[in-house]
Image: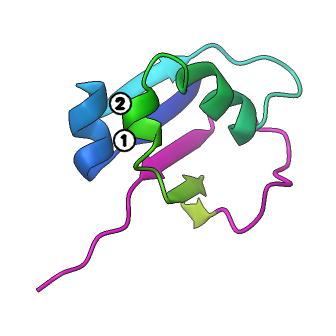
Amino acid sequence: MIRVLFFGPVADCIGARQIELPYRDGLRWQDVRNELQPRHPEAFALVSIVAVNGERVRDEEGAPLADGAEVVFMSSFSGG
């Protein structure tokens, strides 16, 4: 399984903080996004930060995910 976490306004739009997706060979974080985005376009319009297993994704060339991986989608935020 792939654990998918959502934070802040992204979670609010989706109506959940976490979901799980079935693992399949060759799955990348972009595939997770592409699977969920059509169901929640308003949430993914807010996404500006993606992390895989606790590390921020810096480019579109992600390695395949391992079974049990965690993918995080969140928007930018600022503190005060």
Where in the figure is residue 73, as x and y percent of width and height? 47, 47
Report x, y in % for residue 29: 69, 40
Q: Amino acid at mark 1?
A: Phe
> Circles 1 and 2: CB distance less than 8 Å?
yes
Q: How many marks?
A: 2
Position of the N terminus, as image quadrant, is top right
On the picture, is 29 further left or further right than 25? left
Q: Residue at x 28, y 38 (%)?
A: 11
Q: Give whichever of discs 1 and 2 has the lower sequence position.
A: 1
Q: Quadrant of the C terminus?
A: bottom left
Please give the residue where the numbered disc 2 appears in the rendered image: 18
Residue 6: numbered disc: 1
| Quadrant housing residue 37 | top right
Which residue is nearer to you in this view: 1 or 15? Answer: 15
Q: Which residues are magenta?
A: 57-80
Give the structural element (helix, strand or loop) at label 2.
strand
The answer to whether residue 69 is magenta is yes
39 falls in the magenta region: no
